[in-house]
Amino acid sequence: MVAAAPFLVNAQGDDCSTAVPVTPGTYTADGPSTGAGATNLCFGTGGTNADWYVYTATVDGFIEVSSCSSGGIDTRLSVHTGTCGALTCLVSDDDGCNATFSSVVANVPIT
Protein backbone atom coordinates (compact mmCIF):
# COMPACT_ATOMS: atom_id res chain seq x y z
CA MET A 1 0.00 0.00 0.00
CA VAL A 2 1.06 3.47 -0.69
CA ALA A 3 -0.51 5.23 2.37
CA ALA A 4 1.85 12.50 -3.00
CA ALA A 5 10.91 21.04 -9.64
CA PRO A 6 12.25 20.74 -12.87
CA PHE A 7 15.82 19.38 -12.98
CA LEU A 8 15.77 18.48 -9.28
CA VAL A 9 15.85 15.00 -7.84
CA ASN A 10 12.96 14.58 -5.41
CA ALA A 11 13.93 13.94 -1.81
CA GLN A 12 12.89 10.62 -0.30
CA GLY A 13 9.15 10.63 0.36
CA ASP A 14 8.32 13.64 -1.81
CA ASP A 15 6.52 11.57 -4.44
CA CYS A 16 5.24 8.05 -4.98
CA SER A 17 8.43 6.74 -6.56
CA THR A 18 10.48 7.77 -3.50
CA ALA A 19 7.97 6.72 -0.82
CA VAL A 20 9.55 6.07 2.59
CA PRO A 21 9.15 2.43 3.69
CA VAL A 22 7.49 2.19 7.12
CA THR A 23 6.59 -0.48 9.63
CA PRO A 24 4.01 -0.13 12.41
CA GLY A 25 5.02 2.81 14.61
CA THR A 26 5.08 6.59 14.85
CA TYR A 27 6.62 8.77 12.14
CA THR A 28 7.09 12.52 11.71
CA ALA A 29 6.19 14.02 8.35
CA ASP A 30 8.25 17.07 7.44
CA GLY A 31 6.46 18.16 4.30
CA PRO A 32 7.77 17.86 0.76
CA SER A 33 11.18 19.49 0.25
CA THR A 34 10.77 20.10 -3.49
CA GLY A 35 7.14 21.15 -3.69
CA ALA A 36 6.29 17.88 -5.39
CA GLY A 37 3.80 15.38 -4.06
CA ALA A 38 0.26 14.24 -4.57
CA THR A 39 -2.15 16.03 -6.82
CA ASN A 40 -5.68 15.39 -5.59
CA LEU A 41 -5.57 11.61 -5.78
CA CYS A 42 -8.53 11.16 -3.43
CA PHE A 43 -9.95 14.57 -2.69
CA GLY A 44 -10.85 15.99 -6.08
CA THR A 45 -9.59 19.51 -5.30
CA GLY A 46 -7.36 21.46 -2.97
CA GLY A 47 -4.44 19.21 -1.98
CA THR A 48 -1.19 19.50 -3.89
CA ASN A 49 1.78 18.59 -1.63
CA ALA A 50 2.48 15.33 0.14
CA ASP A 51 4.83 13.13 2.09
CA TRP A 52 4.68 9.58 0.75
CA TYR A 53 5.09 6.39 2.76
CA VAL A 54 4.77 2.76 1.69
CA TYR A 55 3.70 -0.09 3.96
CA THR A 56 3.84 -3.71 2.87
CA ALA A 57 1.64 -5.99 4.95
CA THR A 58 3.15 -9.26 6.14
CA VAL A 59 -0.17 -10.53 7.52
CA ASP A 60 -3.83 -9.68 6.93
CA GLY A 61 -5.27 -7.11 9.30
CA PHE A 62 -6.25 -3.46 9.65
CA ILE A 63 -4.26 -0.24 9.85
CA GLU A 64 -4.86 3.24 11.23
CA VAL A 65 -3.10 6.36 10.04
CA SER A 66 -3.58 9.49 12.12
CA SER A 67 -2.31 13.04 12.37
CA CYS A 68 -4.65 13.84 15.28
CA SER A 69 -1.80 14.80 17.62
CA SER A 70 -0.13 17.09 15.07
CA GLY A 71 -0.93 20.23 17.04
CA GLY A 72 -3.68 21.50 14.77
CA ILE A 73 -1.63 21.38 11.57
CA ASP A 74 -4.01 21.13 8.62
CA THR A 75 -3.54 17.66 7.12
CA ARG A 76 -5.20 15.32 4.66
CA LEU A 77 -4.56 11.59 4.73
CA SER A 78 -5.21 8.95 2.13
CA VAL A 79 -4.40 5.27 1.74
CA HIS A 80 -3.89 3.80 -1.72
CA THR A 81 -3.30 0.40 -3.22
CA GLY A 82 -1.46 -0.34 -6.43
CA THR A 83 1.72 0.92 -8.03
CA CYS A 84 2.88 4.43 -8.84
CA GLY A 85 1.00 5.59 -11.91
CA ALA A 86 -1.87 3.17 -11.22
CA LEU A 87 -2.99 3.96 -7.67
CA THR A 88 -6.49 3.36 -6.35
CA CYS A 89 -7.66 5.38 -3.37
CA LEU A 90 -8.99 3.10 -0.62
CA VAL A 91 -9.90 5.74 1.95
CA SER A 92 -9.16 9.37 2.75
CA ASP A 93 -9.92 11.98 5.38
CA ASP A 94 -9.71 15.75 5.67
CA ASP A 95 -10.10 17.25 9.15
CA GLY A 96 -11.72 14.18 10.75
CA CYS A 97 -10.12 14.60 14.19
CA ASN A 98 -12.29 16.28 16.79
CA ALA A 99 -11.96 20.10 16.79
CA THR A 100 -8.73 20.24 14.75
CA PHE A 101 -7.62 20.41 11.14
CA SER A 102 -5.92 17.01 11.54
CA SER A 103 -7.06 13.76 9.94
CA VAL A 104 -7.46 10.04 10.64
CA VAL A 105 -8.22 6.94 8.60
CA ALA A 106 -8.94 3.82 10.64
CA ASN A 107 -9.86 0.18 10.18
CA VAL A 108 -8.39 0.04 6.68
CA PRO A 109 -8.17 -3.63 5.65
CA ILE A 110 -4.75 -4.79 4.48
CA THR A 111 -3.68 -8.07 2.91
Image (cartoon, helix red, strand yellow):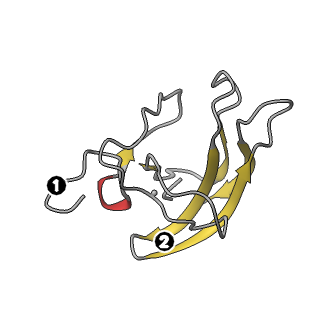
Residue 82 tag number: 2
The residue shown at (25%, 58%) is: 5
Disc 1 secondary structure class: loop
Image vertical order of residue 90 relative to residue 86, above or below: above
Of 48 and 18, nearer the camera is 48
Q: Is residue 66 left or right of residue 1?
A: right
Image vertical order of residue 10 relative to residue 73, above or below: below
Total tally of numbered discs in the picture = 2
Q: Is residue 27 left or right of residue 61?
A: left
Residue 8 tag number: 1
The amino acid pointed to by label 2 is Gly
Of 22 and 71, nearer the camera is 71
The residue shown at (69%, 57%) is: 92
**Spot occupied by residue 80 in the image (x, y as percentages of width and height):** 56, 63
Instruction: Name the residue furthest right.
Output: 98
Disc 2 secondary structure class: strand
**Spot occupied by residue 63 in the image (x, y as percentages of width and height):** 66, 45
Q: Quadrant of the C terminus?
A: bottom right
Query: Marks 1 and 2, Cα distance to the nearest angstrom?
Result: 26 Å
Image vertical order of residue 85 relative to residue 74, above or below: below
